[in-house]
Image (spheres, rainbow, N blue to C red):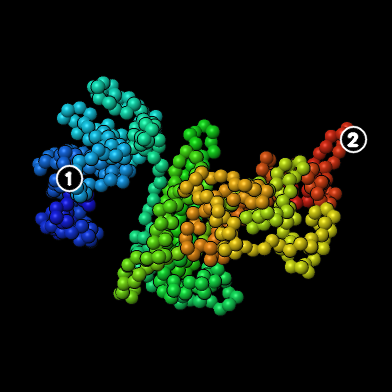
Amino acid sequence: MSLPPYQSEGVIRCPCVKCDCMKFKKLEEVKLHLYRKGFIENYFVWTNHEEIDGSRGIFLNMVVGESSRSVENTNLDSRIEYMVADVFGMHFGCEPTENVEQTPNDDAKCFYEQLEEASRPLRDGNLHSKLSVAVRLLSIRSDWNISQAAMNSFIDLMSELVDTKINLPGDFYKAKRLPRFKRLSSGNMVIIKVMHYLPLIPRLKRFYVSMSSAPHMRWHFENRRPPGVMCHPSNGQDWKHYDRTYQDFVSEPRNIRLGLCADGFMNFSISVTPYSCWFVFLTPYNLPLELCMTNPYTFLNCIIPGPRNSKSLTDVYLQPLIDKLKQLWYDGVETYDISTKKNLNLRANLMLTINDFPAYGMLSGWMIAGKLACPYCMEISKVFTLKNGRKQSWFDCHRQFLPRDHEFRRMKNAFKNNKMEYDSPPPILSGEEIWERVQNFSKATKASPYKFCGYGVTHNWTKQSIFWELPYWKDNLLCHNLDVMNIEKNYSDNLFNTVMDVTCKTKDNLKARMDLQEYCRRPELYMQTTYNGKVFKTKASYIFTLDER
């Protein structure tokens, strides 16, 4: 109903129970009526909404009195045209400023070709085009969860029943390709990247239109804790440092502070098509803990599907979110606070990101692989390669973080063999210091990720993260954070598999015992040799017996 073909002078017939399509209302009023009163009973085909927009020319063929199927297909064609227009950034209703005719540019030519393809009927008198059939097939498959093999069978049957001159998609794969490819100036067809983006600003405004959430948006300001008590992000040093730095922002306690979480999954089965899907969530930290991490207040911002992991190119998909965050920081948006019955200029900022370790590397730009994988130690890392396991190990790197007088520092054989710890921990870099290191690196949105000079030796940077576009990002003390729950889960799994001696999953394997003998003094865990020269692993005291299990 919101499309121009159904509007007349900015108003439409209201299909609510009370108005019964007899009254003309503005779009917002119609929405409100439908929320409160509901649709007319059995009003599935909007035959009373056939207003004609003459600016659409030959591409809109709506006739009053058509059958419901005709109206439905015309609506589908209209939406296909809007989809094509949206891809190429063109819109209807624009008046030319001059009467001088000019040759369409390449983008316009491509647009008209796509529009012609969407409008050309399969045969004379037919309401469907090749593109509309492809969209309809994709919709049917999605609505009814039909397998790809079944869809191919349906398409084969359709091809046998109709005239061979009708150019239908040959199979589901070709149908899926139609809306997702565009032609470059070179003539090559390339895929149009797919991302599902849910707008941020309307979601933030919604916090203030309901009494169930609006009064709680000031909780972080009205419920401060005494020094030394930590039960909410607002009690942390990062939050307090931000308050001291941007006093104009914190002067309005209803301004929203957001946290971002990104996670994804990949199909590891070798028998299916490779697939990756990543999700980006946002949550407001203005709310108390019992609310801010619940489903109504943790909302999905974008979905990034694809045949492979986006990795460092995640920044490309985050551009719409970053643009809105910059708008919310510089200009703000006007919204209504129902708890105070007043309008306010709502602003927002992104306080931090929290992810597992792989996602940490994708968002921060610091590659979490190799000898410099630790984003805290960076080039001062004490990592070493295990002689037998051939993996990077950070064993005994933790003692440098202990207090100077801690007894563990002086233990010569309890950790690494014949070693005591005297070093101080690596320094904590401020946002300004990190920015000095990454400001000359290219962004993933402008160039492909690249291993810059010194990569793997003096640094592990692969890009300049898109978050540095936010003007306040360098002033955050904790920009990127690790998800403790995810780390604890992985640690617990490894610990359980080791003490239960789970085959192929335990970390107490032959190579681990050989490396232990190389670096540590644990004679009871050394490999033993039998009289015939066979080497075997002794049972460790931390392994449960059958009775203990």
Identify whether 441 is placed above or below 220: above
Q: Give the mark nearest the N terminus, 2 or 1.
A: 1
Locate residue 423: give its quadrant: bottom right
Instruction: Please state which of the two labelled residues, at mark 2 or mark 1, is closer to the viewer.
Output: 1
Identify whether 62 is placed above or below 226: above
Residue shown at 32% from the left, 24% from the top? 156
**Crowdedness of circle 2 by 10 Å Cα count: few (<14), some, many (20+)?**
few
Hey, what amino acid is under mark 1?
Asn
| Residue 412 in the image, given as x and y percentages of width and height | 84, 58
Q: Residue furthest right?
A: 531
* Residue 236 seen in this snapshot: no
Residue at the disc numbered 1: 99
| Residue 234 in the image, given as x and y percentages of width and height | 51, 71
Alpha carbon separation for disc pair 2 and 1:
101 Å
Horizontal relation, residue 197 to residue 468: left or right:
left
Q: 214 or 290, which lies in front?
A: 214
Q: Are the residues tagged 2 and 1 within 8 Å (C-beta)?
A: no
Horizontal relation, residue 290 to residue 374: left or right:
left
Assign a secondary structure to mark 2.
Answer: loop
Residue shown at 55% from the left, 56% from the top? 439
| Residue 180 in the image, given as x and y percentages of width and height | 36, 38
Locate residue 286: give its quadrant: bottom left
Q: Residue furthest front?
A: 100
**Crowdedness of circle 1 by 10 Å Cα count: few (<14), some, many (20+)?**
few
Residue shown at 11% from the left, 57% from the top? 23
Residue at the disc numbered 2: 531
| Residue 283 in the image, given as x and y percentages of width and height | 45, 61
Q: 499 or 276, which lies in front?
A: 276
Hey, what amino acid is under mark 2?
Tyr
Residue shown at 44% from the left, 43% from the top? 305
